[in-house]
Amino acid sequence: MEALLFVLFTLLGLAVASFLNVCIDRLPQGKSILFPASHCDSCGRRLACSDLIPVFSYLWRRGRCRYCQARIPRRVLAVEVGIGALYPLLFWRYGLTADLAIITFYCTLFILIMVIDLEHSLILNKVVYPATGIALLVSLLLRRPEIVPAAIGGGIGLGLFLLIVVVSRGGMGLGDVKMAGLIGLVTGFPHVFVAFFIAIISGGLAAVLLLVLKRKKRKEAIPFGPFLALGAIVTLLWGNAILKWYGGAF
């Protein structure tokens, strides 16, 4: 039975990843995620069912449209493989519990925000605002986290990042501020500090690496949303262990 559930969660992850790729392509352009049906962006041809099998279709077609041979972004395969592997791993860790549903939803949400910001340098209100409402409901109804730590975390996220925007005079966008508030609600206090610490450290290391490899120049902006998303995911999965380690170390 457990083996069957692993398979089902893998298939669920692949299906969600396929839909997530549609959202990544269409939401930044203000397009509907439901209509029209999936089609090639280059030639406009509607895709057949055989073109929409996650991972398999990409590999079988060698990453190209079978009608016009236009290249399909590698991100499509990366998202499908990543979420297809993530879902069964989350099931293995949490089992069939409320925590599984909550963590799975939040990880999927932050992956969506991460990839859109990487590709388009946008953190969309149409994603962040509904997610903030859901996070409030989860705290009120399921108490994960409790509403008081969630509210404190959200306030810290909004206040801290708004202060950074003011001090840096536009060095950070308001999208990052709203996302920081969402992360505070999702992780709660004091875990919100773990999420921001991981985001700052990972963002700094990535910036140095890009400069060393000459992929970015000194004055070129690097989206911070992906690192905020990474910090949130790591905190959701290992925040308690990190805080316990920190308390023991210091």
Image (cartoon, rainbow, N blue to C red):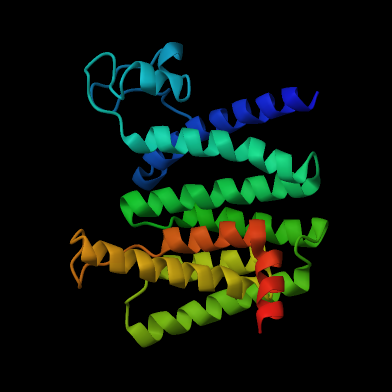
| Left/right of residue 126 with respect to residue 218 in the rendered view | right
Measured from the top left, where is residue 10 in percent x and y? 62, 29
| Left/right of residue 73 with respect to residue 2 in the rendered view | left
**Residue at x-position 20% and y-position 58%:** 215
Query: Among all residues in the image, which is located at the extreme bottom?
Result: 167
Query: Among all residues in the image, which is located at the extreme front?
Result: 249
**Residue at x-position 31% and y-position 25%:** 63
| Left/right of residue 240 with respect to residue 129 in the rendered view | right
| Left/right of residue 79 with respect to residue 104 in the rendered view | left
**Residue at x-position 50% and y-position 58%:** 230
**Residue at x-position 59% and y-position 75%:** 193
Q: Is residue 32 visible?
A: no
Where is the N terminus found, in terms of image quarters? Answer: top right
Measured from the top left, where is residue 169 in percent x and y? 32, 83
In the rendered view, would you say 10 is above or below 222? above
Q: Is residue 96 visible?
A: yes
Measured from the top left, where is residue 49 in percent x and y? 46, 13
Measured from the top left, where is residue 117 in percent x and y? 38, 54
**Corner quadrant of residue 70:** top left
